[in-house]
Amino acid sequence: MVDVATDVSARETTRLIASDKVEGTPVRRSNGDKVGTIERVMIDKRGGKVAYAVMSFGGFLGIGDEYHALPWSVLRYNENLDAYELNITDQQLRGAPALASGWDTGTIDRGWERNIHDYYRASPYW
């Protein structure tokens, strides 16, 4: 059975959530400590699958934030935390591959994506 909202303005159903509602959702460890915040969700144009999430962390009130890509498959929504769960240390997160030139350059290629998935030991979405 497909979970479909009957109202076009619905932003969440039992199993589905609108991308704009995911943005701004906290990412926490299972103990409740905040890791970061989902800034955006990146979707494969051709396949339609969620490829990864861009998460901000480490700053204060948006100043000094770092941004990293997380394979979507490493995040699990935890209703008890009202957040996406990711059990990773700050050191592991800072050691993850990053784009030095920013997220809007269009320089992400399959090799970079493979690197991200390998780092987090996640199966690629493709």
Image (cartoon, rainbow, N blue to C red):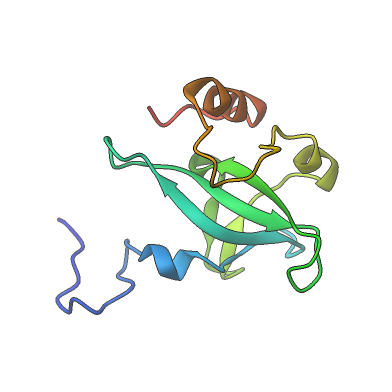
Q: Is residue 82 above or below residue 86?
A: below
Whole-percent x and y of residue 101? 66, 40
Q: Is residue 110 left or right of residue 112?
A: left
Q: Is residue 90 above or below residue 34?
A: above
Q: Is residue 105 above or below residue 110?
A: below
Q: Is residue 29 visible?
A: no
Q: Is residue 55 visible?
A: yes
Q: Nearer the viewer, residue 61 or 87?
A: 61
Whole-percent x and y of residue 21? 44, 70
- Quadrant of the drawing holding the C terminus: top left
Q: Is residue 122 left or right of residue 19?
A: right
Q: Is residue 12 left or right of residue 77?
A: left
Identify the residue at horizontal 32%, vertical 61% (top origin). 15
Res 95 → quadrant: top right
Identify the residue at horizontal 80%, vertical 63% (top origin). 59
- Quadrant of the drawing holding the N terminus: bottom left
Whole-percent x and y of residue 115? 61, 24
Identify the residue at horizontal 45%, vertical 47% (top origin). 42
Q: Is residue 44 left or right of residue 118?
A: left
Whole-percent x and y of residue 120? 64, 32
Residue, far right: 91
